[in-house]
Amino acid sequence: MKPRSALLLLFAVTLLTGCAAVSQAPDVAETAAEHTDVASPVLDPESTYAGSPFADVGLSGLFPVRNPRECEVAVISNGGDSFAARMAVLKNAKKSIRIQTLIFRGDESGVRIAEVLKQKRAEGLDVRVIVDAFSNPWLQTQWMFFDLKQNGIEVEGYEAMALQWLNEVPVPLLTPHNDLTNPDKRYHEKMWIIDGETEHGVAVTGGLNIGNEYFRADPNNPAMNWRDQDVVVRGKVVNDLVAAFDRNFDFFIAIKESRGIFNTNLYWDATRNVMDTTGKLPINYTTDPAIAGYVAQLEGRQPAMEFRPATCRFLQNRPRLEETYLLQSYQKLFHQAEREILIANAYFVPTPALSTAIKAAAQRCVSVRLITNSPEANNHPQISLVGRGYYKDILSINDAPEVTACPNADAGVRIWEWTGQAVDEQSPSQGTMHSKFAIFDGAISLVGSYNLDPRSERLNSENAIVFRDEILSGQLRRLFYENDLNYSREVTAQDAVAFEVPDSVIEQFQQTLGNMLKEEL
């Protein structure tokens, strides 16, 4: 989920008052895309990438390829199993806990996680959390963060009395590599790392934030049964997730330290010292007993996880440093595909680089299959309405001579929209499809936080893991065909034409507004 509604007004003003200056700025992502060495495989240790243009960063943000002795991956089939897997490794933590997520909601599942985090901190573990400063506005969530902080857990992206915005204001010369014309660079990464500095370290990464909808914790509310995708990883590749988390954490700490007397950590240290004498502030949470009971059931699950050795590479994008490793990886993977590309992505608003890669694959007779949200299922329907405006152009490649001449009948592009409702159902039984994964030739897969839209390409910090193994990729492929397509409807060429101008006046307005703000969606 990408909580954009609270930011739309801010960025409408930003765009309308400063669009001339912004529009003249070079598009870093598209410039990098034009110079990507697409013939250089992602999982080749000698693969070439364009790094950050900043001399002090360069390619330092690119992680190495890990061989199968250094990387084991297990595919998790749904959000409930992801919660169970996360809680199992969390409760077994012996040394450290690192969690980064856009959203850490103070609902039944989030409060349960917070409870275990406090227990582990009391046992002496190093417990650190990163959340996005503008994506967790709910009052109970803010109190939960306060509770974590008063119990000695650092929560970057949170300050008491909602003062985290102070750390978002760039100070010239004190905040290096900051683009004042783009204040909306959010932190969208998702990492759950346990004992990462040890030989038995384990991590969960993928598309899930922390909240009931992601973990499907409210079975009586279909709209809260989201479809999402995580994987669990072990081996030396976990070191790369640790490095990504630590440099993010250090970045936030450095911002605070640059503020001098406005360094909020100074006051938290003083507050904790006082609380050692006076006692901590009691925090009471409002929860639904039925949902809390189901969360406990989920926690008791023992999901089957088949770890398999795989060649893999962990990738991180930091737009503040003008890194584009995930876009470049998608381009490489599209270029190297020979038979089939399967994509499940929540928010599909293709940029020129992505549209070009999709069409080029189709022209090589590759079967490209895409699932994204319908407006009815999308938690941000305006994104689907904007994305629909690209369907006609993308599907038109199917009429190109190169595609019509292909010997395989499945060549070309087909698009489905997730509705959350199977053919034999009277009403939707699933909520938003929040997955972000892709499978190439049934052998190489990418799973992560990266959406196929301008925000992930240019504004959000993101992460993903690419791995090569036919059995693991086959598991994702089966989820795509046997589960995800079952809750989706295909978009025909006629649909694509009709979608360009919605019938509903309200949808026309949403689409128009969305197109104005599509770089921020």
Image (cartoon, rainbow, N blue to C red):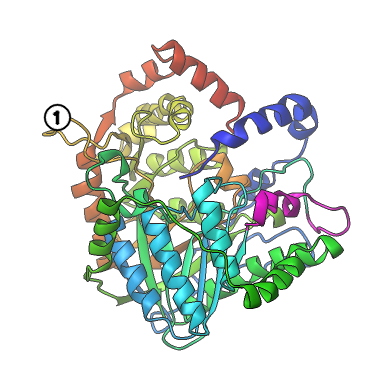
Residue 2 colored in magenta in the image: no
Residue drawn at point x = 24 percent, y = 57 percent: 294
Image location of residue 407, percent across then percent down: 25, 41
Amino acid at dot 1 = Gln
Indicate left or right for 466 with 266 as reference: left
Residue denoted by label 1: 426
Q: Name the one closer to the observer, 115 or 1.
A: 115
- Residue 25 is drawn in which quadrant? top right
Image location of residue 284, percent across then percent down: 46, 57
In the rendered view, tell whether residue 432 sits above or below residue 159. Answer: above
Image location of residue 194, percent across then percent down: 45, 77
Whether residue 45 is visible here, answered yes or no, is: no
- Residue 440 is drawn in which quadrant? bottom left
Residue drawn at point x = 26 percent, y = 31 percent: 490
What count of labels does the image hold? 1
- Dot 1 falls on a residue whose secondary structure is loop
- Residue 305 is drawn in which quadrant? bottom left
Image location of residue 63, percent across then percent down: 57, 71
Q: Name the one closer to the observer, 411 or 119.
A: 119
**Where's the C terminus, which quadrant?**
top right
Q: Name the one closer to the observer, 92 or 116.
A: 116
Question: Can you name the residue that lies furthest to the left here?
Answer: 424
Residue extent of the magenta highlight: 157-177
Question: Can you name the residue that lies furthest to the front here?
Answer: 278
Residue 169 colored in magenta in the image: yes
Indicate left or right for 255 with 346 as reference: right
In the rendered view, tell whether residue 379 sits above or below residue 366. Answer: above
In the rendered view, tell whether residue 264 sits above or below residue 355. Answer: below
Number of residues whose C-alpha sits closer than 10 Å to that of mark 1, classed few (under 14), some (14–19) or many (20 or more): few
